Image (cartoon, rainbow, N blue to C red):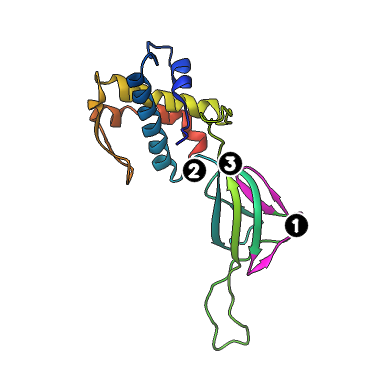
Amino acid sequence: MNTIITPEELIKFSSSDLSMDNQEDIEKLEFYCQMATDYFSNLFGYSLELSQEIERLKGNNQDKLYLKKRPIVEVESLKINGIEVPSSKFTVTQNYIQLNKGIFKQGFDIKFPYLSMRTIKSDEIEIIYQAGYKFSDKETGEIGNVPYDIKMACCLLVKNLMYETSDIGNVKSYKIGDISYSFADKLERDETFKTILNKYLW
């Protein structure tokens, strides 16, 4: 599985005595890189790796809709009330999509039995899009595009995990299956790496 930061990058960025001299060292660094990547997924609420996403939203009476996963790379499909909207009718940014004309209508979603007006409903919107970053692929050697500040934050987290104690005792529990973590008290208090991520957290 690919990770936000690779063991090689971890050694490069950490300016420490980390090494990959033997298989045990390699496996240990891979473990920490994977654990940090999973922790970031929990922190953001989604994986940072590039993937296809589907969101179903209601209109907000604005011309913009902010999507959950970012950066947005491509919008494959936008439907409003089941009708496909041509790509020429909207603009895509890293954080949101914007209609070139009109708004995503927001209604009361209730009926008015004593009025001549019909139900005022919000627009039902479905968006299929690609979002996230390409992780470096150790199998193909392809270099990813994860921003360096995110990699640095990941590096700081790994260093916290590795050096607050002399070994893996820094982690109280770790379950790969359900990504359940419980960090040592000192790590829970010392989250300086989050300051680097502020502009990415919303």
Give the crowd class for mark 2: few <14, some 14-19, many >=20 residues within 10 Å.
few
User: Is residue 84 one of those drawn in magenta?
Assistant: yes
* Mark 1 element type: helix
Of tags 2 and 1, the one toward the viewer is 1
Q: Please report the residue visible at 54 percent of the width from the left and 25 percent of the height from the top.
A: 148
Residue 89: mark in rendering: 1
Is 61 magenta? The answer is no
Q: Position of residue 12 (x, y in %)?
A: 48, 15
Report crowding for label 3: few under 14, some 14 to 19, many 20 or more residues within 10 A (C-alpha): some
Residue 77 picture quarter: bottom right
Rounded to the nearest whole Å, what is the CA distance between mark 3 and mark 1? 20 Å
Which region of the structure is painted magenta? 80-98
Which residue corresponds to the image point at 35% horizontal and 29% vertical from the top-left?
31
Kindly identify the amino acid type of the residue bearing the numbered disc 2.
Trp
Identified by mark 3, the residue type is Pro
Tell me which amino acid carries mark 1: Lys
Label 3: state its secondary structure: loop
Residue hosting label 3: 71
Give the secondary structure at mark 2: loop
